[in-house]
Amino acid sequence: MGSGLHAYGGRPYAVLPSGEVAVVDAETGQVVVGKATTGTAHTYGDLASSGSRLLCVREDADGDELVTVDPATGSSTVLRTTDGFFSSPDTRGERLAWTSWDRDVMPWDSSQIWVADYVPGGPVGVPVLVAGGPAESAVQPRWADDGSLFFLSDRSGWWNLYQWRSGRIEAVAPMPAECAAAPWESGYANYVLLPGNRIGITVQHGPEHQLVVMEPGGGTSPLALPYTSIKPYLAAVGDRIALIGASPTRPQEIALVATDGSDHLAVVRGDPIDGGDGVSVPQVLRVASAGVELTVLFYPPTAEPAPLIVRPHSGPTHHSDLRLDWEVQFFTSRGFAVADVDYRGSTGYGRDFRKALDGNWGRFDVEDCRNVAEHLLATGRALPQAVFISGASAGGYTALRAACEDGPFTMAVARSAIVDPNRWKTTAPRFQRPHAAILAHDHAAVTPGQVRRPVLLIHGDRDDVAPVNDATTLADALERRHLLVGMLRLDGVGHYLSAPAALAAALEAELDAYQAVLRQAGLRLPD
């Protein structure tokens, strides 16, 4: 089971009133219910129950369709068509809501929520625009029992919750915090509607999440949880909330949280570690860069100063996760310090900060990572001549761009990296091509002649997000210039190194490269 809708997937299953479960087959992209299957040339996702039928979004090279599927036969009926994108269909009674955005924008920049009359099995009425526009991201529509519609919008500069009722929109508990995740996947649920007109919702400040309950009178009650990271997959189970949570000392676990004031937590599935002994817990640092304040998760090693690995996160429209990261622990347990940087363009800091990287990818993110490294050097927390930058996907691009400049970085490690954002406009998945166009500039490409620092490249040969040929072409040119540390090409591996063997090979190659630099500089290897 798994959906490839819009490249990153979303909501690959739904439970029908009959008790049957409809799923998306990960290999074919088709909806399967019992022995019935859709069997069309599309990729399906965003499944939801709608009476006796299934409501979902499907995609092909020409655009998206909002469709219903007959669970008995697998036959489909098209409700809406666009050359852009649909997501988050939701029905209640004879009303349908959904999100859409144009083919040349990203949903976190510009998206709209629509509603229309709809009788299951019949046509869709004339759509009415509820919220969203060129400078507003409106996402996650959800019908309430009273016929009103809730949704999240960043119209105030922060993704907050709103309610649409009788044609009027009201803010629900406005706050200077993000209550939505950037919609990389369809079907996110950052809030749930609870009995008694209460609402459970995630609240994000930088890398840290909370879960709060919004009361009918407008007040909010934070829940006392051991989690600092909460996935955008909330679900209501009666008056309890099901979630996936984690912290720097707790791996991700599925839990049920009481909202009756007891804060009772029942872990449904998890793999706890014994007291967190030996785990490096991050210190949250604030570092100035180009007139703005950055948030940095600094993982101290066993002794300071130490070799430092600066890590720009992937995305780049994302953030560093304040949760247990075994890749970080792999290096801190071997004497390295690690700094995860929420550079300009990160989520969790409002719309203006999120949009700051537009047209400046490979500039502002590199400047911010460099300033963090120089701050840690100046404060005696990093070892000179042993400062590295390492990133994956968009973070890999940042690492490559950093290797094109003078500065504190001795070497760059780029995993599954984007090499040329302007070429990526044509090679990226349909969903992400506008992302490249919005972020890039005329001089965004990493060219071999620009590179000034040694580079280790790690790439899967089945990467359908960042073409492997771009990495191998760069590797060949860097080898001729004696700037290639190595090119680890992983057979049968895609954009994400999810298989344990592939990840282990990547980490060992990265560690070997760092240790070779330290030996060459005559520096003591970490214990």
Image (cartoon, rainbow, N blue to C red):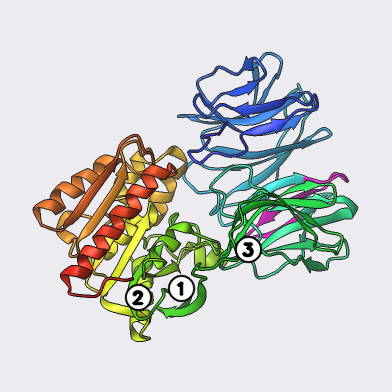
Q: Residues within 10 Å of mark 2 (few under 14, many from 20)?
A: many
Q: Up-down: is 235 above or below 222?
A: above
- Foreground: 253 or 344? 253
Residue designated by label 1: 298
Tell me where residue 289 sits by quadrant. bottom left
Is 226 on the left-hand or right-hand side of 396? right
- Foreground: 226 or 242? 226
Name the residue type under label 2. Answer: Ala
Name the residue type under label 1. Answer: Phe
- Foreground: 323 or 424? 323
Mark-to-mark CA distance, 1 and 3: 23 Å
Residue at 75%, 45% (x, y): give it. Answer: 142
Query: x%, y% of residue 72?
Result: 71, 15
* Dot 2 or dot 1, earlier in sequence: 1
Mark 2 or 1, which is nearer the eye? Answer: 1
Q: Residues within 10 Å of mark 3 (few under 14, many from 20)?
A: many
Residue designated by label 3: 178
